[in-house]
Amino acid sequence: MILAVVSTLAIVIQDHAGLRAAPRSSSVELTQLWQGDVLEIRAERAGYLKVYDQRRERGGYLRADSAQPVELSESAAPELLAVLRFLRGSPGSESLGISYGAAYLKAAPSQTITAEPFDAIAQMAERLADQASGSANHLTEFAPHLEVVEKLGVRMREFERNGRMQVCYDGELYRRVLSFPGARPQERARAVLGLTRADCIDPDLGPVPRAALDTERARLLEQVKDSELNAMTRGRLHARRAAVWAALAYEQDRRGEPAGAAAERARAELLAVDPAELGDERRSEYLDAILQVSAIRWAGELPAPQTGRVTLSAAPGDPGQTCVALEDANRPRAAAVIRRCTYGIVRMASMQWIAQAPALVLAVQPLESWRELWIFHPRSGSWSVDVLSPGLDNPEEGYVDFAGYAPGTKRLLIAKELKDRGRFRRSFEELRLEDLALVRQASSPDLLRDFGRWQDVVWRRDTLALH
């Protein structure tokens, strides 16, 4: 006998729930359903719900314990909100929580709705996108959940970044949170952080729209008052502001505009972060900010007078290029000893002459978060230039610093920080100047004897590698 059910809707609460042709476990499985799928209930029979799936345009029978009937009425709204609050903090239940959030928004009277459900749904959507991005087989593991939330109106964006698929929530509900006059400070801060993520910027975005986007990111970050937030959120905001202002400084430099104020703001925001307050879960955001601020270390600074036996000059080359020429200081009218061109930003303020070597070092920034070190030095009777890169391939984030020179051993002292395939690495190295071969390497400068005596004073004062 078929019994009528009071509720007309049900939310699937289990993954791989089988929709069958008849109310029997041995009947043909028509399809599999996933957490958060919303079904119309037509009847109940023998422990099965007779349902219709609007998304798949298919009916069938589902075990009653695989779904939870829900009522979209004002009286049911408090219970739906309670479930939403529980699922908001339950990793792995994002699509289910988003479905309950959508049910609550339909059931609750509009005048009683606050920013809380929008904040909760947006958090779960962002977490689901992060899980899909971090999975090697995201299409098979998370595609069903992404399809469920897409049907509920939650939009995702996908693009390739550094050889892996990046999935990002589009942030619509975070914007709704910011539009609520009564939104709490923590809710507004989460919304701003969700809308200003650098890893969710399309890498194919052109320089003009990217600059406009970074300006908007900076504006959003200014909307939140730090004094109203807990210590972790305050630290995250400072780290995010540091990264955004570093991006703005880079863009201003690329356009030939003064970048000193933006670079100084980026450093000030970074120094305001207390890493201990972020914990292990959010420490990566701080490390990203360090790499980005370090990459624009010399933005807006003027080069010091050159006093070595060779001088370095920079001039425009082909469109978009800057060409660096090394010249003999005693023969100003002679042809350049060596000339090299780059599409990166040449940081002339970083130029340093090493008289004991002799050698000259120069920082060049080809990308927003990637800075190399050019080393000019004599080899086999003539000058040559070698490029030290933070990593070998697939640039993500990183920089190389000249940290000193040990005349007794004729070794360059180098500091590197790098993000490679999502992992952060820091190293301090001693390189043989003649061929730049690695002699010693350590995770701390205290473990290298030459660093203790010969590290550069300016580097020691300004570096962020000792954080």
Image: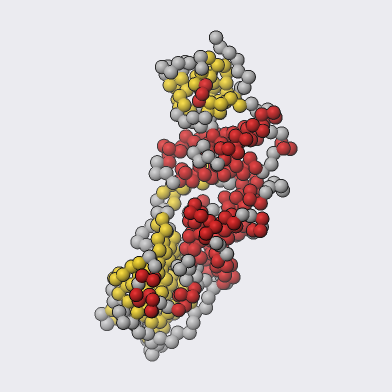
From the viewer's side, name the closer residue of 130 and 31.
130
Residue 444: in sight, yes or no?
yes
| Residue 121 drawn above or below residue 228 | above
- Expressed as whole percent of the image width and height from the top left, the position of residue 172 reads 60, 44
| Residue 162 drawn above or below residue 456 | above
Name the residue rendered at 51%, 32% in the picture. 35
Name the residue rendered at 44%, 49% in the picture. 160
- For residue 275, side relative to residue 378 (left or right): right
Labels in figure, total:
0
Name the residue rendered at 48%, 54% in the picture. 280
- Expressed as whole percent of the image width and height from the top left, the position of residue 359 reads 36, 80
- Expressed as whole percent of the image width and height from the top left, the position of residue 461 reads 49, 75
Residue 216: in sight, yes or no?
no
Task: Please identify the residue farthest to the bottom as the structure is shown.
Answer: 330
- For residue 450, side relative to residue 322 (left or right): left
Name the residue rendered at 69%, 33% in the picture. 108
| Residue 411 drawn above or below residue 165 | below
| Quarter holding residue 367 | bottom left
Task: Please identify the residue farthest to the top as the structure is shown.
Answer: 1
- For residue 205, side relative to residue 333 (left or right): right
- Expressed as whole percent of the image width and height from the top left, the position of residue 463 reads 47, 71
| Quarter holding residue 4 | top right
Quadrant housing the N terminus: top right
